[in-house]
């Protein structure tokens, strides 16, 4: 990984993995002459005209120009002839207020800011869920995560283990699967967190390669504090502490009985003492086999179906991800490709290389954000150096809001959500679900445009499918709406009139975009109880709960007008808002209609699906002696 001041051409261009065979002549010809002007996104005209782009070839315009002379053929032929590359970049736990283009003046994010200057920026872009696993499920499928069973039912709200059986069901259709069917090379580099196996260590039923990606390099799980030996435990830390306390108490009881036996104070046989000691030992082994080796079981890297690093070397992870992303772009530059770059930044434990440590004004978190921006810049440089800038549709976002409760003795380890209330884990408040939304396609999308319409991460699914020439599935509910008309300026308003905001399986809030008046209403049915009282988050616990004693039920519901009060600081009442009852009734009716679209599905987060199962654990080497480095040898890293 090169230092920030070196030439882009000195950045690594290595990488391994299978090289796709063959190129698509038609797609290559289209790339040489088109700058997106003849795609279905182009505002006008449908037939090519004017000079080609910087890397264009004038002669490649003539076949399409001749086609345009045949009545009715140009739009269809042009649309089929040109398929752009698609680069989707998703940060992890990034707050919308952490970027310069969204108002931050103290963190340096020049590359992402430049992406916004050269493209379209959305100011009301919303995650469908406030936690990693369900949010990413919705992003991949264009559907609320509970439709796939990828939401909590009063229990775990995200996948906890690589060796668990829960995950994105095989019958779900991702945008990668549809684009793969359209001839795209489809790659995922980075975080997956949608499960791995179902019944055996190698069935890979939830694996990216079983969901439309033909290349995968990265973490099948997610970064957690357990990945860093110097950090306190994170995965099920409360349960782990209770189990350790129970083990100590049981061991102390057995020891007391043994001492009593030796001193003649207790009349029991040694067989009973040994039997009790054996039970305590078995209890300890049963839970320590998983919780005692979280780093080895969860913090691994895979290339396609093979584990390449177990446990992973955190200091080298950023360079690995960059190398793989650049290599993937270079390997597939002569055919249409979809690359989903799912960043590990800026999730705790905030692994940051030495070049960026201590460089920001906001401690380790700020250092990690600035390193993330540099990494994004390197990938964008690779796109430009390979002559793909004008033929690549690029998108940047985060999976949900910043993690307010992430702190240690040195200070804040989570992001900043700007003026918006709440954060990660909160399904209703804006800070948990409002995320960056930046789109760039030079020559097709207007540079510097800002759109203030409600949109969703779920909208990327139909947008990308339309862009790649595919069709949205008709056999299931798709909650996303194509952003094509909005981004190209053909539509003034978002296709969403209502959006519904869940925390686990519970509907916490809903919004209504009153398009005729431009007013944007938000109704809260439940809100988390902050701790301590008056704080802006649930400090002392990982994230705020979705139900039970941890939430407040609102009857009548809270009402805010986001168009005037985006910080949700001034709840309206019948006395202060004449339309209060009308708005609450209108949103309530929409909620009822929405609930009619719901149907029961098997939950992927049930206890049986969420617990660690040794026979499902990905492993390089012989289980349980799983260990290997990037060179593939079975040795400790």
Image (cartoon, grey):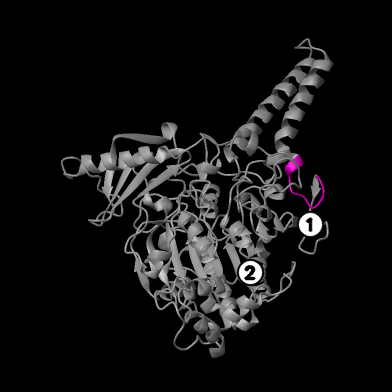
Neighbours of disc 1 within 10 Å: few (<14), some (14-19), many (20+)? many
Q: Is residue 633 left or right of residue 399?
A: right
Can see residue 531? no
* Residue matched to label 2: 325
Residue 408: mark in rendering: none
In the image, residue 131 lies at what x, y percent? 50, 48
Residue sitting at 53 percent across and 86 percent down? 62
Q: Residue furthest front?
A: 71
Label 2: element kind:
helix
- Residue 564: which quarter of the image? bottom left
Region of the chain picked out in magenta, as a range: 615-623
The mark total stands at 2
Placement of the C terminus among the 4 image quadrants = bottom right
Q: Is residue 32 left or right of residue 204?
A: left
In the image, residue 606 lies at what x, y percent? 59, 35
Label 1: element kind:
loop
* Residue matched to label 1: 628
Can see residue 306? yes
Placement of the N terminus among the 4 image quadrants = bottom right
């Amino acid at each position: 990984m090169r230092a920030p001041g070196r030439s882009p051409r000195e950045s690594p261009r290595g990488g391994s993995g299978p090289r796709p065979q063959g190129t698509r002549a038609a797609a290559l010809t289209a790339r040489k002459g088109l700058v997106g002007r003849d795609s279905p996104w182009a505002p006008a005209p449908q037939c090519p005209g004017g000079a080609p782009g910087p890397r264009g070839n004038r002669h490649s315009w003539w076949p399409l120009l001749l086609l345009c002379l045949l009545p009715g053929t140009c739009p269809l032929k042009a649309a089929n002839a040109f398929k752009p590359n698609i680069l989707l970049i998703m940060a992890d736990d990034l707050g919308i207020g952490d970027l310069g283009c969204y108002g931050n003046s103290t963190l340096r994010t020049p590359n992402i800011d430049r992406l916004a200057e050269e493209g379209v920026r959305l100011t009301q872009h919303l995650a469908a869920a406030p936690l990693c696993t369900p949010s990413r499920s919705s992003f991949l499928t264009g559907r609320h995560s509970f439709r796939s069973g990828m939401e909590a039912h009063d229990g775990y709200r995200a996948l906890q283990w690589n060796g668990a059986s829960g995950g994105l069901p095989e019958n779900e259709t991702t945008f990668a699967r549809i684009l793969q069917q359209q001839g795209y090379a489809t790659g995922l580099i980075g975080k997956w967190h949608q499960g791995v196996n179902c019944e055996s260590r190698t069935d890979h039923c939830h694996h990216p390669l079983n969901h439309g990606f033909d290349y995968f390099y990265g973490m099948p799980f997610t970064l957690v504090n357990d990945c860093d030996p110097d950090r306190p435990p994170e995965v099920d830390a409360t349960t782990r502490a209770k189990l350790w306390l129970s083990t100590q108490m049981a061991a102390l009881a057995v020891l007391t009985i043994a001492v009593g036996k030796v001193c003649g104070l207790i009349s029991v046989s040694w067989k009973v003492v040994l039997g009790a000691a054996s039970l305590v030992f078995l209890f300890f082994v049963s839970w320590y086999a998983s919780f005692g080796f979280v780093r080895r079981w969860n913090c691994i890297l895979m290339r396609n179906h093979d584990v390449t690093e177990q446990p992973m070397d955190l200091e080298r992870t950023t360079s690995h991800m960059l190398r793989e992303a650049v290599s993937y772009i270079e390997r597939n530059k002569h055919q249409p490709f979809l690359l989903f770059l799912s960043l590990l930044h800026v999730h705790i434990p905030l692994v940051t290389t030495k070049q960026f440590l201590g460089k920001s004004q906001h401690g380790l978190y700020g250092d990690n954000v600035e390193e993330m921006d540099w990494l994004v810049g390197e990938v964008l440089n690779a796109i430009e150096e390979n002559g793909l800038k004008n033929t690549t549709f690029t998108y940047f976002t985060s999976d949900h809001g910043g993690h307010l409760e992430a702190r240690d003795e040195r200070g804040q380890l989570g992001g900043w959500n700007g003026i918006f209330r709440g954060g990660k884990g909160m399904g209703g408040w804006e800070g948990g679900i409002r995320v960056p939304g930046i789109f760039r396609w030079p020559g097709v999308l207007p540079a510097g445009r800002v759109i203030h319409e409600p949109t969703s991460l779920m909208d990327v699914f139909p947008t990308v499918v339309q862009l790649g020439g595919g069709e949205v599935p008709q056999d299931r509910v798709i909650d996303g709406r194509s952003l094509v008309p909005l981004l190209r300026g053909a539509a003034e308003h978002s296709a969403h009139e209502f959006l519904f905001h869940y925390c686990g399986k519970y509907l916490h809030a809903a919004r209504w975009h009153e398009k005729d008046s431009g007013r944007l209403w938000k109704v809260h049915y439940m809100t988390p109880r902050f701790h301590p009282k008056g704080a802006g988050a649930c400090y002392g616990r990982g994230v705020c709960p979705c139900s039970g004693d941890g939430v407040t039920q609102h009857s009548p519901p809270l009402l805010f007008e986001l168009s005037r009060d985006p910080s949700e600081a001034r709840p309206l009442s019948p006395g202060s808002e004449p339309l209060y009852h009308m708005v609450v009734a209108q949103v309530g009716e929409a909620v009822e209609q929405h609930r009619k679209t719901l149907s029961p599905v098997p939950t992927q987060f049930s206890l049986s699906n969420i617990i660690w199962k040794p026979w499902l654990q990905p492993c390089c080497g012989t289980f349980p002696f799983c260990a290997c480095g990037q060179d593939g040898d079975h040795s400790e890293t």
